[in-house]
Image (cartoon, grey):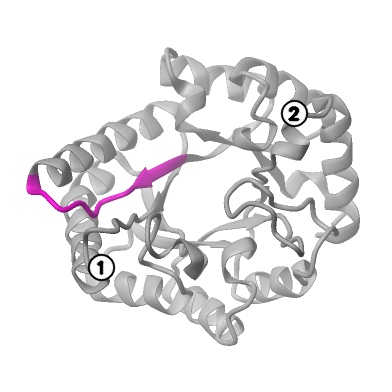
Amino acid sequence: MNDLSRLAIHTATTKPWDLETAVRKYADAGVSGISVWKEALEGRDPAAAGAAIRAAGLAPVSLVRGGFFPAPDPETRAVRIRDNERLLRAAAELGAPLLVLVCGAHPEVRIAEARDQVRSGIEAVLPLAEKEGVRLAIEPLHPMYAGDRSVINTMREALDLCEGIGSPSLAVAVDVYHVWWDPELEAQIGRAGRLGALAAFHVCDWKTPLEDMLEDRGLMGEGCIDIPRIRSWVERAGFRGFAEVEIFSRRFWAMDQDEYLGRILAAFREYV
Protein backbone atom coordinates (compact mmCIF):
# COMPACT_ATOMS: atom_id res chain seq x y z
CA MET A 1 0.00 0.00 0.00
CA ASN A 2 1.77 3.12 -1.22
CA ASP A 3 -0.82 5.52 0.17
CA LEU A 4 0.55 6.71 3.52
CA SER A 5 -2.72 8.59 4.10
CA ARG A 6 -4.03 5.24 5.38
CA LEU A 7 -1.02 4.50 7.61
CA ALA A 8 -1.27 4.80 11.38
CA ILE A 9 1.25 3.56 13.93
CA HIS A 10 0.66 2.50 17.52
CA THR A 11 2.96 4.21 19.99
CA ALA A 12 3.84 0.78 21.47
CA THR A 13 5.44 -0.09 18.14
CA THR A 14 8.21 2.45 18.82
CA LYS A 15 8.13 1.94 22.57
CA PRO A 16 11.47 3.66 23.34
CA TRP A 17 10.05 6.99 22.10
CA ASP A 18 7.91 9.04 24.43
CA LEU A 19 4.63 10.37 23.07
CA GLU A 20 6.01 13.76 22.04
CA THR A 21 8.90 12.17 20.13
CA ALA A 22 6.62 9.66 18.43
CA VAL A 23 4.24 12.40 17.31
CA ARG A 24 7.06 14.44 15.84
CA LYS A 25 8.81 11.53 14.17
CA TYR A 26 5.63 10.04 12.72
CA ALA A 27 4.50 13.37 11.33
CA ASP A 28 7.90 14.12 9.80
CA ALA A 29 7.87 10.70 8.11
CA GLY A 30 4.48 11.27 6.48
CA VAL A 31 2.49 8.95 8.75
CA SER A 32 -1.15 10.02 8.93
CA GLY A 33 -2.53 8.56 12.14
CA ILE A 34 -1.49 7.54 15.63
CA SER A 35 -2.99 5.10 18.10
CA VAL A 36 -1.98 6.01 21.61
CA TRP A 37 -1.27 3.35 24.21
CA LYS A 38 -2.50 4.27 27.66
CA GLU A 39 1.04 4.04 29.07
CA ALA A 40 2.10 6.81 26.69
CA LEU A 41 -0.45 9.13 28.33
CA GLU A 42 0.83 8.64 31.87
CA GLY A 43 1.51 12.00 33.49
CA ARG A 44 -0.01 13.88 30.55
CA ASP A 45 -3.26 15.74 30.03
CA PRO A 46 -5.19 13.81 27.37
CA ALA A 47 -6.77 16.94 25.91
CA ALA A 48 -3.38 18.63 25.54
CA ALA A 49 -1.92 15.47 24.03
CA GLY A 50 -4.76 15.31 21.52
CA ALA A 51 -4.27 18.96 20.58
CA ALA A 52 -0.56 18.34 20.01
CA ILE A 53 -1.31 15.29 17.86
CA ARG A 54 -3.72 17.21 15.66
CA ALA A 55 -1.39 20.22 15.46
CA ALA A 56 1.27 17.89 14.03
CA GLY A 57 -1.16 16.82 11.31
CA LEU A 58 -1.88 13.36 12.74
CA ALA A 59 -5.28 11.84 13.39
CA PRO A 60 -5.82 10.28 16.82
CA VAL A 61 -7.13 6.87 15.74
CA SER A 62 -7.69 5.07 19.04
CA LEU A 63 -6.73 4.74 22.67
CA VAL A 64 -5.32 1.32 23.49
CA ARG A 65 -6.23 -0.61 25.58
CA GLY A 66 -9.16 -1.14 27.91
CA GLY A 67 -10.87 -4.36 28.92
CA PHE A 68 -9.36 -7.02 31.24
CA PHE A 69 -12.77 -7.54 32.83
CA PRO A 70 -12.56 -11.07 34.32
CA ALA A 71 -11.36 -11.57 37.88
CA PRO A 72 -12.16 -14.06 40.65
CA ASP A 73 -13.58 -11.44 43.02
CA PRO A 74 -16.24 -8.75 42.52
CA GLU A 75 -14.07 -6.03 44.07
CA THR A 76 -11.40 -6.41 41.38
CA ARG A 77 -14.03 -6.52 38.66
CA ALA A 78 -15.49 -3.26 39.99
CA VAL A 79 -12.04 -1.64 39.93
CA ARG A 80 -11.62 -2.69 36.31
CA ILE A 81 -14.98 -1.19 35.38
CA ARG A 82 -13.81 2.11 36.87
CA ASP A 83 -10.49 1.81 35.02
CA ASN A 84 -12.35 1.42 31.73
CA GLU A 85 -14.55 4.38 32.49
CA ARG A 86 -11.46 6.47 33.17
CA LEU A 87 -10.00 5.34 29.83
CA LEU A 88 -13.21 6.22 28.02
CA ARG A 89 -13.06 9.75 29.41
CA ALA A 90 -9.39 9.98 28.43
CA ALA A 91 -10.20 8.82 24.89
CA ALA A 92 -12.88 11.48 24.60
CA GLU A 93 -10.48 14.18 25.83
CA LEU A 94 -7.78 12.90 23.49
CA GLY A 95 -10.21 13.09 20.59
CA ALA A 96 -9.84 9.38 19.80
CA PRO A 97 -13.06 7.87 18.45
CA LEU A 98 -12.23 4.36 19.67
CA LEU A 99 -11.16 2.51 22.81
CA VAL A 100 -9.73 -0.90 21.92
CA LEU A 101 -10.62 -3.71 24.32
CA VAL A 102 -8.43 -6.65 25.20
CA CYS A 103 -11.28 -8.37 26.99
CA GLY A 104 -9.26 -10.27 29.56
CA ALA A 105 -8.89 -13.71 31.12
CA HIS A 106 -7.84 -15.11 34.47
CA PRO A 107 -6.39 -18.55 35.19
CA GLU A 108 -8.62 -18.88 38.28
CA VAL A 109 -11.82 -18.12 36.35
CA ARG A 110 -13.25 -20.86 34.14
CA ILE A 111 -13.59 -19.80 30.56
CA ALA A 112 -17.40 -19.81 30.36
CA GLU A 113 -17.66 -17.68 33.49
CA ALA A 114 -14.91 -15.38 32.23
CA ARG A 115 -16.85 -14.82 29.02
CA ASP A 116 -19.92 -13.91 31.06
CA GLN A 117 -17.79 -11.44 33.02
CA VAL A 118 -16.54 -9.92 29.77
CA ARG A 119 -20.10 -9.36 28.60
CA SER A 120 -21.10 -7.89 31.97
CA GLY A 121 -18.08 -5.59 31.94
CA ILE A 122 -18.81 -4.31 28.45
CA GLU A 123 -22.46 -3.73 29.32
CA ALA A 124 -21.41 -1.81 32.42
CA VAL A 125 -19.23 0.68 30.54
CA LEU A 126 -21.34 1.03 27.38
CA PRO A 127 -23.57 3.82 28.75
CA LEU A 128 -20.51 6.01 29.31
CA ALA A 129 -19.12 5.09 25.88
CA GLU A 130 -22.38 6.18 24.31
CA LYS A 131 -22.41 9.40 26.36
CA GLU A 132 -18.79 10.26 25.47
CA GLY A 133 -19.16 9.33 21.79
CA VAL A 134 -16.34 6.78 21.94
CA ARG A 135 -16.84 3.34 20.41
CA LEU A 136 -15.59 0.20 22.11
CA ALA A 137 -13.75 -2.18 19.79
CA ILE A 138 -13.47 -5.81 20.90
CA GLU A 139 -10.15 -7.19 19.68
CA PRO A 140 -10.20 -10.99 19.55
CA LEU A 141 -6.83 -12.40 20.60
CA HIS A 142 -5.10 -15.55 19.38
CA PRO A 143 -6.18 -18.64 21.36
CA MET A 144 -2.70 -18.91 22.93
CA TYR A 145 -3.78 -16.01 25.14
CA ALA A 146 -7.06 -17.58 26.32
CA GLY A 147 -5.65 -18.44 29.75
CA ASP A 148 -4.41 -15.04 30.82
CA ARG A 149 -5.17 -12.24 28.35
CA SER A 150 -8.46 -12.79 26.52
CA VAL A 151 -11.21 -15.39 26.41
CA ILE A 152 -12.54 -13.77 23.22
CA ASN A 153 -10.45 -15.47 20.55
CA THR A 154 -12.31 -15.39 17.25
CA MET A 155 -14.15 -12.86 15.16
CA ARG A 156 -17.26 -15.00 15.51
CA GLU A 157 -17.16 -14.69 19.31
CA ALA A 158 -16.56 -10.95 19.15
CA LEU A 159 -19.39 -10.40 16.69
CA ASP A 160 -21.74 -12.63 18.68
CA LEU A 161 -21.12 -10.27 21.59
CA CYS A 162 -21.78 -7.24 19.40
CA GLU A 163 -25.03 -8.70 18.09
CA GLY A 164 -26.14 -9.93 21.49
CA ILE A 165 -25.57 -6.59 23.18
CA GLY A 166 -26.89 -4.62 20.23
CA SER A 167 -25.26 -1.22 20.69
CA PRO A 168 -23.88 0.83 17.77
CA SER A 169 -21.13 1.88 20.18
CA LEU A 170 -19.74 -1.68 20.22
CA ALA A 171 -17.60 -2.95 17.34
CA VAL A 172 -14.59 -5.14 16.56
CA ALA A 173 -10.92 -4.61 15.76
CA VAL A 174 -9.29 -6.99 13.28
CA ASP A 175 -5.65 -7.62 14.20
CA VAL A 176 -4.06 -9.92 11.63
CA TYR A 177 -1.62 -11.32 14.22
CA HIS A 178 -4.51 -12.79 16.18
CA VAL A 179 -6.98 -13.91 13.51
CA TRP A 180 -5.00 -14.76 10.35
CA TRP A 181 -5.32 -18.53 11.01
CA ASP A 182 -9.13 -18.57 11.32
CA PRO A 183 -10.84 -20.47 8.45
CA GLU A 184 -13.97 -18.35 9.04
CA LEU A 185 -12.11 -15.05 8.84
CA GLU A 186 -13.33 -13.89 5.43
CA ALA A 187 -16.95 -14.68 6.26
CA GLN A 188 -16.77 -13.05 9.68
CA ILE A 189 -15.16 -9.90 8.31
CA GLY A 190 -18.04 -9.72 5.84
CA ARG A 191 -20.47 -10.16 8.72
CA ALA A 192 -18.77 -7.32 10.59
CA GLY A 193 -19.23 -5.10 7.57
CA ARG A 194 -22.92 -5.93 7.31
CA LEU A 195 -23.35 -5.14 11.00
CA GLY A 196 -21.51 -1.82 10.68
CA ALA A 197 -19.16 -3.12 13.36
CA LEU A 198 -15.77 -3.10 11.63
CA ALA A 199 -13.88 -0.39 13.50
CA ALA A 200 -10.14 -1.08 13.20
CA PHE A 201 -7.52 -2.99 11.20
CA HIS A 202 -4.13 -3.78 12.79
CA VAL A 203 -1.15 -5.17 10.88
CA CYS A 204 2.15 -6.89 11.66
CA ASP A 205 3.36 -10.42 10.84
CA TRP A 206 3.66 -13.88 12.40
CA LYS A 207 7.24 -15.11 12.59
CA THR A 208 8.15 -18.79 12.67
CA PRO A 209 9.49 -19.87 15.06
CA LEU A 210 7.86 -17.51 17.53
CA GLU A 211 10.40 -16.81 20.27
CA ASP A 212 8.02 -15.00 22.62
CA MET A 213 4.22 -15.10 22.71
CA LEU A 214 3.89 -11.38 23.32
CA GLU A 215 7.01 -9.53 22.21
CA ASP A 216 8.22 -11.21 19.02
CA ARG A 217 5.85 -9.94 16.37
CA GLY A 218 7.25 -9.58 12.89
CA LEU A 219 7.47 -6.59 10.62
CA MET A 220 5.10 -6.94 7.70
CA GLY A 221 6.69 -9.28 5.15
CA GLU A 222 8.74 -11.22 7.71
CA GLY A 223 6.19 -13.94 8.30
CA CYS A 224 3.36 -16.02 6.92
CA ILE A 225 0.33 -13.72 7.10
CA ASP A 226 -1.27 -12.81 3.77
CA ILE A 227 -1.89 -9.21 4.77
CA PRO A 228 -2.99 -7.88 1.35
CA ARG A 229 -5.63 -10.60 1.12
CA ILE A 230 -7.03 -9.80 4.56
CA ARG A 231 -6.91 -6.09 3.72
CA SER A 232 -8.97 -6.83 0.60
CA TRP A 233 -11.56 -8.54 2.78
CA VAL A 234 -11.88 -5.62 5.20
CA GLU A 235 -12.09 -3.16 2.32
CA ARG A 236 -14.73 -5.27 0.56
CA ALA A 237 -16.65 -5.18 3.84
CA GLY A 238 -16.68 -1.39 3.62
CA PHE A 239 -13.77 -0.47 5.88
CA ARG A 240 -12.08 2.77 4.81
CA GLY A 241 -10.07 3.54 7.92
CA PHE A 242 -6.40 3.30 8.77
CA ALA A 243 -4.16 0.27 8.54
CA GLU A 244 -2.53 0.49 11.96
CA VAL A 245 0.96 -0.92 12.49
CA GLU A 246 1.11 -2.58 15.91
CA ILE A 247 4.33 -4.49 16.56
CA PHE A 248 5.58 -5.65 19.94
CA SER A 249 9.20 -6.71 19.45
CA ARG A 250 12.16 -6.60 21.79
CA ARG A 251 14.33 -7.01 18.71
CA PHE A 252 12.99 -3.86 17.09
CA TRP A 253 12.79 -1.88 20.33
CA ALA A 254 16.51 -2.51 20.77
CA MET A 255 17.49 -1.00 17.41
CA ASP A 256 17.74 2.61 16.30
CA GLN A 257 14.12 3.77 16.18
CA ASP A 258 14.64 6.12 13.24
CA GLU A 259 15.97 3.22 11.19
CA TYR A 260 13.10 1.08 12.40
CA LEU A 261 10.55 3.69 11.35
CA GLY A 262 12.08 3.67 7.89
CA ARG A 263 11.68 -0.09 7.76
CA ILE A 264 8.04 0.23 8.80
CA LEU A 265 7.32 2.64 5.95
CA ALA A 266 9.05 0.40 3.41
CA ALA A 267 7.25 -2.74 4.66
CA PHE A 268 3.90 -0.93 4.68
CA ARG A 269 4.36 0.08 1.05
CA GLU A 270 5.39 -3.40 -0.07
CA TYR A 271 3.42 -5.81 2.09
CA VAL A 272 0.22 -4.05 3.16
- The reply to whether residue 34 is visible in this rendering is no
Mark 2 belongs to which amino acid?
Tyr
- Dot 2: element: helix
Mark 1 belongs to which amino acid?
Arg
Q: Is residue 199 left or right of residue 12?
A: left
The single residue placed furthest to the left in the displayed view is 74
- The reply to whether residue 172 is visible in this rendering is yes
Q: Is residue 135 left or right of residue 29?
A: left
Where does the image place residue 248, in percent across and percent down from the top left? Answer: 64, 43
Measuring 23% from the left and 74% from the top, which residue is drawn there?
A: 112
Using the image, determine if residue 221 lies above or below residue 228: above
Using the image, determine if residue 60 lies above or below residue 218: above
The answer for how far apart the CA atoms under marks 1 and 2 are is: 37 Å
The image quarter containing residue 172 is bottom left
The residue to which callout 2 is attached is 26
Q: Is residue 101 left or right of residue 173?
A: left
69 vs 227, nearest the viewer: 69
Nearer the observer: mark 1 or 2; the answer is 1
Q: Quadrant of the C terminus?
A: bottom right
The image quarter containing residue 270 is bottom right
The residue to which callout 1 is attached is 115
Where does the image place residue 203, in percent across and percent down from the top left? Answer: 68, 56
Region in magenta: 64-74
The image quarter containing residue 211 is bottom right
Measuring 42% from the left and 12% from the top, which residue is drawn there?
A: 43
Q: Of label 1 and label 2, which has the lower sequence position?
A: 2
Measuring 42% from the left and 21% from the top, which residue is drawn there?
A: 46
- Dot 1: element: helix
Measuring 23% from the left and 55% from the top, which residue is drawn there?
A: 70
Does 227 appear in magenta? no
Where does the image place residue 67, in percent across and percent down from the top left? Answer: 33, 49
Q: Total label count?
A: 2
